[in-house]
Image: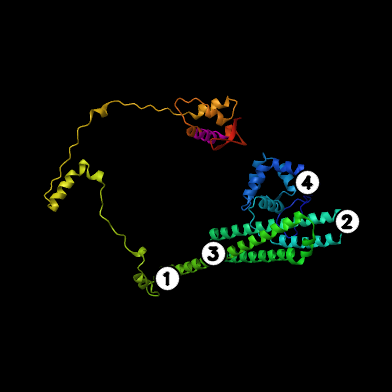
Amino acid sequence: MVRMLLFCSPFKTKRAQPKHLVSFHNISELLKTFDREKKLLTEVFEKRKIPYKLDIALALVEDKEERIDFLLTHGVLTKNGPYIELDDQYLQFFETILEVNEEINISYINENIQQVKQNILYHLQENNADRQYAYLKTIKNTLRKISRISFRNMIDLLRNIDNTFKTEPNYTIKIAKLEHYDLKRKDISVLLDQTELLITTEEQAFFTSAFDEELKQIVTQLRHRINELRHNSIELQKQIIDYLNQVKYHSKVLEKLKQVKYLKDQFDLKNKSDFIDILRQNTAVVFESNPSYPLKLSMDALQSDDLIEIKQRAAKRIRTGLKAKLPVANTIDPEYFDDQYEQQVFINLDEIKNSFSAAGNHLFDFIMHYRFLRPVDFEERVNIYCQVVSTYQNELNITEEYQRQQNIEFAMVYPK
């Protein structure tokens, strides 16, 4: 029986929670509820960062308040005045599964390290083989969980650092968040050291004497993951330092700009600063005046009839003595007036696909023996095969079987 009973924290007094929460009786009931209210739950999750009104939610459940009440009494949703939102337990579950969580929770790693130590102690003190195997299985699953959680936290940390640097508008808050994430990075590194110490030194006798190939493989993979995460932590530290330097530099530039603007608004910029002298000494290209270039006409424009008079006056002005003459075109060849036709046979992919749908063999063999209206060599038939597959892939049955013909490997494709 699946117990999904949620408990209200005594510190959250603002939310009007139902007096008695009802638990789901089994997984089937839970999944049916999620399937029935998938539209509502999807929209509430997507708009979890903004207030979501109950009136909007009713439109997604066909204005049936009992469906909203069912979610409230079963702890899936919580109500706060005219607004509703996902309960924290389901919200964290969806964010973790969809990999969009922003909180870096490293306490899970520490809890799993302690759990490994406890189960190793239980395993060594247990004499029953079945119970020993149960403890060993728990140790394996916990070690896998440590590897997965550590990697997930490092990825979340990297994403949060990038988002903070690129989207946080307040420089003070941006610096505080980056420094906070750097502390999280250090905490993860400490826990990685503790994990490696656990499997190499503290419990080395257990991992050495344990006659289980799967456990040895898990430990080896965990050590490789720890080394990988350490390298990532070093790169992450460099990135945080670079981001902090950029933020602090831009923050100083912004403060100076604010001071300059204040002096300008008070009409004291010239009297209380050397702003004008600094600008005079600055030779940056941005302070140079834009150069003006004479207009240059294209050759087609110069050869047009409208510019003949302008060119004549220009020639008189510069006294070259040359006279512009309008060139006479040559006589047009009479052959240009003869009607000429060119015929070209195009390959109709729709016709090929429709004919293939009525055939019984696979597509490559069908195209190799297809009678086209013009000669088509082997290479062009291969290109036609690729075009048909890429154009009508949703209307074809593309299998995982492959064959080879004339050094070309192709998939076996059949009509649906």
State whether the magenta stretch is mostly helix, strand or loop: helix
Question: Given the current orientation, which residue lies at the most extreme front position?
Answer: 406
Residue at numbered disc 2: 128
Closer mark to the observer between disc 3 and disc 2: 2
Residue name at image x 72 percent, y 46 percent: 71
Residue at numbered disc 3: 243
Q: Earlier in the sequence, mark 2 or mark 4?
A: 4
Q: CA distance from mark 1 to mark 2?
A: 83 Å
* CB-based contact (under 8 Å), mark 2 and mark 4: no
Residue at numbered disc 4: 24
Amino acid on which the number 1 mark rests in the picture: Leu
Q: Quadrant of residue 285?
A: bottom left
Q: CA distance from mark 3 to mark 4?
A: 47 Å
Q: Which mark identifies residue 351?
A: none
Q: Is residue 12 visible?
A: no
Secondary structure of the residue carrying tag 4 is loop
Residue at numbered disc 1: 263
Q: Earlier in the sequence, mark 4 or mark 1?
A: 4
46 versus 356 height, above or below = below
